[in-house]
Image (spheres, rainbow, N blue to C red):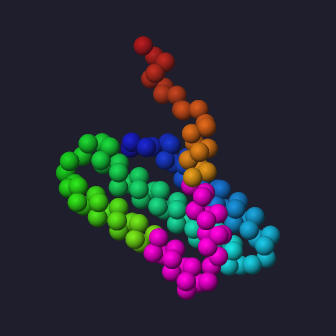
Amino acid sequence: MLFGTAKKRILINSLLIGALTSLASIYFKDWTITLAVALSALAMSANFWLLCKVIEGVFRGDTSIPRWKIVARLLAKVIFIFGALAIFIYVGKLEPLAMLAGISNVVVAIFIEGLLPAPRDEEQGQG
């Protein structure tokens, strides 16, 4: 797996940050704000995971998947996730600004991952 531990840590961190921001949003005493933060945090975590799944093959140099299929998968992912968020806003009357707080969780998780030291490879010290 190309992204291995970094992908796992980013996903775990984004879900933890999403849970914390959802808990913090309870302060506003409006269930639509808490739901908006939680749903958008989950959607963006799913977006990151799906993006990794789609592009892992590209970075490995896998030529068995045609480029148009990769583009189609990326477009389908974007349409599905952002379409779902738009439906949540219009039908569910969720707060768009609260959704921005949830969307930013993955960005914060990636930033945290960039600040942490890279895991050492066990074989690197041998030789």
* Prevailing secondary structure class for the magenta stretch in the rendered image: helix
* Residue 88 falls inside the magenta stretch: yes
For residue 4, side relative to residue 76 (left or right): right
Which residue is at a point 73% across and 65% down the rendered structure image? 23
Q: Quadrant of residue 102?
A: bottom right
Q: Nearer the viewer, residue 106 or 56?
A: 106
Residue 48, position as x, y percentages in the image = 47, 56
Total count of labels:
0
**Residue 6 vertical position relative to residue 100 in the rendered view, above or below:** above
Q: Name the image quarter holding residue 78.
A: bottom left
Determine whether, in the image, residue 63 is placed left or right of residue 73. left
Horizontal side, residue 24 vs residue 81: left or right = right
Seen in the picture, residue 46 relative to 55 is either above or below; the reply is below
Which quadrant, please, contains the N terminus? top left
Residue 15 seen in this snapshot: no
Quarter placement of the C terminus: top left
Q: In the rendered view, tell whether residue 98 sits above or below residue 90.
A: above
* Residue depicted at x 28% and y 58%: 70
Asked if residue 36 is positioned above or below residue 4 in the image, the reply reads: below
| Residue 36 drawn in magenta | no
Q: x%, y% of residue 94? A: 62, 79
Tell me what residue is drawn at x 46 percent, y 21 percent.
124
The x and y percentages for residue 106 are 56, 55
Q: Would residue 6 be found to the left or right of residue 62 on screen?
A: right
Furthest residue in direction front, as rendered: 97
Res 112 seen here: yes
Q: Start and end of the magenta stretch?
A: 82-106
